[in-house]
Image (cartoon, grey):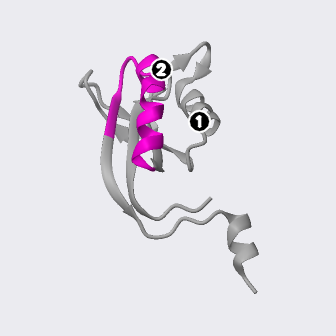
Amino acid sequence: MRLTGTAVRLTIMVGETDRWHHKPLYAEIVHRAHQAGLAGATVLRGIEGYGASNLIHTARLLSMSDDLPMVILIVDTHERVNTFLPQLDELVHEGLVILDDCEVIRYVGRGAERSAQP
């Protein structure tokens, strides 16, 4: 898959302990994004943060938190991301969902890059 030009970055912030049917919520979001054919998804585990609860969660040794921030990043076309948004309405009950317009400079899957070489 190739993706260049104008796109949308979908950022979803949830807690590490958030669940969907006994499964980590971030994992369910990634699996659904994959099923929806989105270009890709990455999950980042935060080391410190706070949100609507106003409680600071941190990975520092003396105050180990079991609910660190999880950030899921997805970049794809406006159309594909907008089609995926209703699934997030179902999944994300607490958290933050952000859409940003972005410009993709280069995104080439491993197989596509190798086959394009002479």
Rendered-image quadrant of the N terminus? bottom right
Q: Position of residue 16 (x, y in %)?
A: 49, 29
Name the mark on residue 36: 1
Left or right? Give the position of 28 relative to 10. right
Residue at mark 1 to residue at mark 2: CA–CA distance: 15 Å
Indicate whether 9 appears above or below 56.
Answer: below
Asked whether 58 falls inside the magenta stretch, the response is no
Extreme residue toward the bottom, this view:
118
Of 50 and 106, the residue lying toward us: 106
Quadrant in the rendering for residue 15: top left
Span colored in magenta: 77-98
Rendered-image quadrant of the C terminus? bottom right
Of 118 and 26, the residue lying toward us: 118
Q: Residue at x 32, y 42 (%)?
A: 99
Label 1: which secondary element: loop
Of 4 and 24, the residue lying toward us: 4
Indicate whether 18 appears above or below 72.
Answer: above
Q: Position of residue 22 (x, y in %)?
A: 62, 14
Quadrant in the rendering for residue 36: top right
Earlier residue among tags 1 and 2: 1
Q: Which residue is mark 2?
A: 91
Of 59 and 100, the residue lying toward us: 100
